[in-house]
Image (cartoon, rainbow, N blue to C red):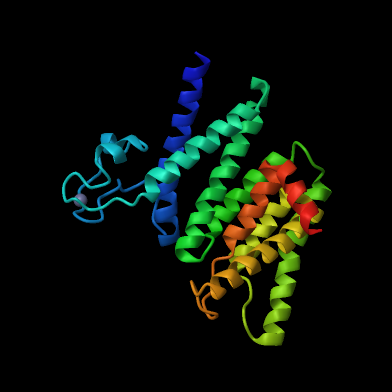
Amino acid sequence: MIFFFKILVFFAGACLGSFLNVVIYRVPLGMSVVTPRSKCPGCKKSIYWFENIPMISYLFLKGKCSECDFKISKRYPLIELLCGVVTLILFLKIDTYSQIYFYLFQVSIALTFIALFFIDLDHKLLPDSINLYLGATLLAYSAFQYSWKYMLLGFLIGGGFPFLITWLFYKLRGKIGLGGGDIKLWAALGIYLGPVDVVHNIFLSCLLGAVVGLSMIAAKVISRDNAIPFGPFILIVATLQIFLPDLYAQLKSLIV
Ligand SMILES: [Zn+2]
């Protein structure tokens, strides 16, 4: 029975992943996530519910549209798998069912991170609507745990500090360093991380971004003029801070 329940949680997570694929594709294009129904980009055939079962349909259709053989990206089933695994791991971490409330918040935050991560990779932007959703979720989640001073200060420093650096950089160099979406993401994260950890996030994600960016330039994957999306670095550090605090503390002690 317990095993069956775990399978059910995993599958529910994979279904959320299927919805996340729609969010990742449509939100940056300004499309509704509810209507119209998904269509094959190749032949415009509507996709039936039985062709939309997470991971299973992909395997069954052998990664192609049933009508026109249009290749379906491997990323769709992989994101479904990732969401299923994340939803299950978070579920296994709760001890009693009274924590289910916290669990739902954690799933919502983790899945929002995944959506922002892939949208930024695809489009080099973090949509306002998703940053706002994340901020509201983190506010509701934090309200049970922290004082309003902690949350307000985290929000103001998370947004204000990188804004100031970007403004100074622009005045000095005439270039925009960080995008507005990155700054809004930090403001949202600051609500939960608080004033100290959000500053740590800013420094560590800049460090991580610099290491990865310079390595990619050295390996000639990108040229010096290419901008790489910055959101993923913020999200990787925030994932460690929120979901893997022990690992985060160990990694931080190596650097600081
Ligand atoms: Zn097709």
- Asked whether residue 73 appears in the rendered view, the answer is yes
| Residue nearest the viewer, comparing 56 with 113 | 56
Residue 75 in the image, given as x and y percentages of width and height: 39, 50
Task: Please indicate whether residue 200 sits to the left or right of residue 69 in the image.
Answer: right
Q: Residue 59, image x and y in percent?
A: 29, 38
Residue 139 is at least partly visible in this image:
no
Image coordinates of residue 173 in percent, x first then y, are: 67, 86
Residue at figure coordinates x 51%, y 36% from the top left: 85
Q: Residue sitting at 78 percent across and 58 percent down?
A: 255
What residue appears at the point 50 percent right and 51 percent down from the top-left corner? 115
Could you tell me residue 28's position as x and y percent?
Answer: 45, 60
Image position of 164 with respect to 194: above or below: below
Left/right of residue 27 with respect to residue 126 in the rendered view: left
Quadrant of the rendered image containing residue 175? bottom right
Q: How many marks?
A: 0
- Asked if residue 177 lies left or right of residue 30, the reply is right
The residue sitting at the left extreme is 67
* 195 shown above or below 110: below
Residue at horizontal 44 percent and vertical 56 percent from the top:
27
Residue extending furthest toward the top: 1
Q: Quadrant of the C terminus?
A: bottom right
Between 31 and 4, the one nearer to me in the picture: 4
